[in-house]
Image (cartoon, grey):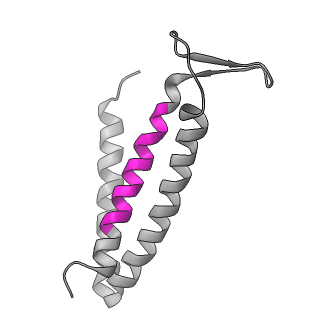
Amino acid sequence: MGVNVGDWLVLVAVAAGVLSAWRLLAGTGRGRLLARVGAVVSLVFAAFFFWLWYAMYLKWDFNELGRYYDPVDGVVYTDSGFVWVLPAGLALLACAFFAWRGWGGRRD
């Protein structure tokens, strides 16, 4: 279950589309406002993904096999829930970037 070339091409296409849309909207003179909105939205996504990371990984005491059995709900949790920290960290980095562009950084 690896990453193939098609996945990378989709990722590059999405990034190019976001960059193009950002440059188009920033050219209208509303760059600071959009950056501030982007910072708030990214912060909300970061908080959501950090909550998922806590709920799926940090909350449980896994055994040596990487599993936790919840006897109340009858559910087995695995230690694969750590992956939720990746989108949380990326959203937090995006929040820092947008906050820098919206409230600090260079003046346009």
Point out the residue furthest to the left here. Answer: 106
At a point 52% along the width and 31% down the height, the residue shown is: 81
> Does the magenta segment cover residue 91?
yes
* Side of 82 where 10 appears, left or right: left
Snapshot quadrant of residue 18: bottom left
Q: Position of residue 104 (x, y in %)?
A: 27, 79
The answer to whether any part of residue 90 appears in the image is yes
> Does the magenta segment cover residue 96?
yes
Name the image quarter holding the N terminus.
top left
At a point 50% along the width and 10% down the height, the residue shown is: 64
Point out the residue furthest to the top here. Answer: 65
The front one of 28 and 85 is 85
Q: Position of residue 105 (x, y in %)?
A: 22, 78
Judged by its main secondary structure, the magenta piece is helix
The answer to whether any part of residue 21 appears in the image is no
Q: Position of residue 52 (x, y in %)?
A: 57, 43
At a point 53% along the width and 40% down the height, the residue shown is: 53
Relative to residue 28, is residue 19 depicted above or below? above
At a point 33% along the width and 82% down the height, the residue shown is: 31
Residues drawn in magenta: 82-97
Snapshot quadrant of residue 57: top right
Name the image quarter holding the C terminus.
bottom left
